Amino acid sequence: MLVRRVVSTTSFPKLFGCSYSSFSKIGSFASYTSSPASSLSPKHEEYSYRNENELAEINWDELRFGLVPTDCMYVMKSSQDGEFTHGELRNFDNIKLNPSSGVLNYGQGLYEGLKASRKREEGGLLLFRVEENAMRMKMGADRMFMPSPSLDQFIHAVKLTVLANKRWVPPHGKGSLYVRPLLIGSGPILGLAPSPEYMFLVYASPVGNYFKEGLAPINLLVADKTHRAMPGGTGGVKTICNYAPVLKAQMQAKSKGFSDVLFLDAVNNKYLEEASSCNIFIVKGNVISTPATNGTILPGITRKSIIEIASDLGYQVEERLVPVEELSDADEVFCTGTAVVVAPVASISYNDKRYTFKTGKETVSKRLYNTLTAIQMGLVQDNKGWTLEI
Ligand SMILES: *Cc1c(COP(=O)(O)O)cnc(C)c1O
């Protein structure tokens, strides 16, 4: 059955291109409306999506953290004056870039990551703290000397991308739709200088657990020769430049059976910073400590949320310098990030020593994980206004 209501396309001129192609490809259907009176999605001002229950035909039980191509992506370019205009949904596909584009030659690029979850009943979708991602991209764009979409443009693009790929949002409890906004210098440049044009792109992929261990505890190796960030550098923003340089250390650790590397500060080689794509917390009694974000650590939105949840639950939360030696008497260690959520750490290896930590059901990290995911999945009332239902 194919039901489609054709409505005004003035605000989203190219929208139907992307949805039409998904009709013909898989026989599912989507419909958007610009009418605020839409009855099926009252919270949505400008558009809504029909056929709430249609799901893509993949094995949802085998989802891992890997790319599953979805139907649509959102693309918007900046003009010379740095204004982003004419955003549109397109079929998910390769993009064309000039070989001399700023991102390919000089690494002018940023990414973001957030998740959309399906609520238990009626399949409503929840975005988690999307405005935080929008603000972080703006801060990162400033550091990388790039213009950025406005907060409203960012949030609008994420909503559109999620709704257009709704059938790829896993069933409740099976995972989530990972949304990846990108901001890249797309214009041609030869001498080192900012790109003359920028592209803002949003794509999405259904994901399950990040580590191959699933929800099982992970094992980290302290990187003793590689650093991911330095004072005055870009460690505090989600620029693509921060990630390729850690691959070698990460792959060496993985080849020895570790899940990821843990970085120390570059000046003293002594204080904990974070893992390659997640923040770290240590637990000792009622005190939960995490390295303060001083420009070399990515200010994670999960980190920020866990700090608040832990304080609410009565823990004493400290953001400070955390010397690596403190691992020797920590009760628990866990990592946080959108992709990993709250990942318990079973062991950290450093200088031929292996520190082990408490894991399992009766742990602080499990309690924090349960509290956070209940909000993210809409299992409890969101008193904090962290979720946005679309
Ligand atoms: C993205 C990221 C995190 C986690 O940030 P969230 O907003 O919680 O997803 C932590 N560290 C690094 C290096 C990251 O890139």
Image: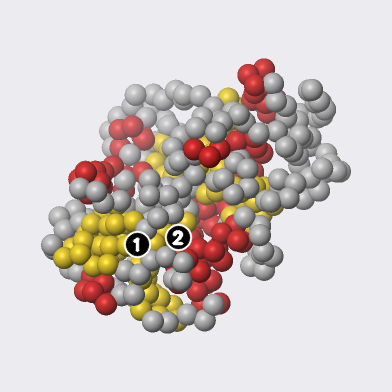
Residue 5 placed where, x, y %? Answer: 82, 27
* Above-or-below relation of 33 to 44: above
Q: Are marks 2 and 1 in contact (CB under 8 Å)?
A: no
Residue 339 in view in this figure: yes
User: In the drawing, does residue 61 fall left or right of residue 251?
Assistant: right
The answer to which quarter of the image holds residue 39 is: top right
Q: Residue at x 77, y 35 (%)?
A: 50
Residue 349 placed where, x, y %? Answer: 21, 61
Instruction: Find disc 1 in the rendering and name its residue.
Output: 345
Q: Residue at x 13, y 63 (%)?
A: 351
Question: How many residues crowd mark 2 within 10 Å: few (<14), some (14–19), many (20+)?
Answer: many
Residue type indicated by callout 2: Val
User: In the drawing, does residue 256 fall left or right of residue 139?
Assistant: left
Residue situated in front as seen by the camera: 202 or 128: 128
Numbered mark located on residue 342 in the image: 2
Q: Which element is circle 1 on? A: strand
Q: Residue furthest left?
A: 352
Q: Which element is circle 2 on? A: strand
Residue 132 placed where, x, y %? Answer: 54, 57
Q: Residue furthest top?
A: 24
Q: Which quadrant is the N terminus positioned in?
A: top right
Q: Residue furthest front?
A: 361
Residue situated in front as seen by the camera: 343 or 356: 356
Residue at mark 2 to residue at mark 1: CA–CA distance: 10 Å
Residue situated in front as seen by the camera: 341 or 247: 341
Question: How many residues crowd mark 1 within 10 Å: few (<14), some (14–19), many (20+)?
Answer: many
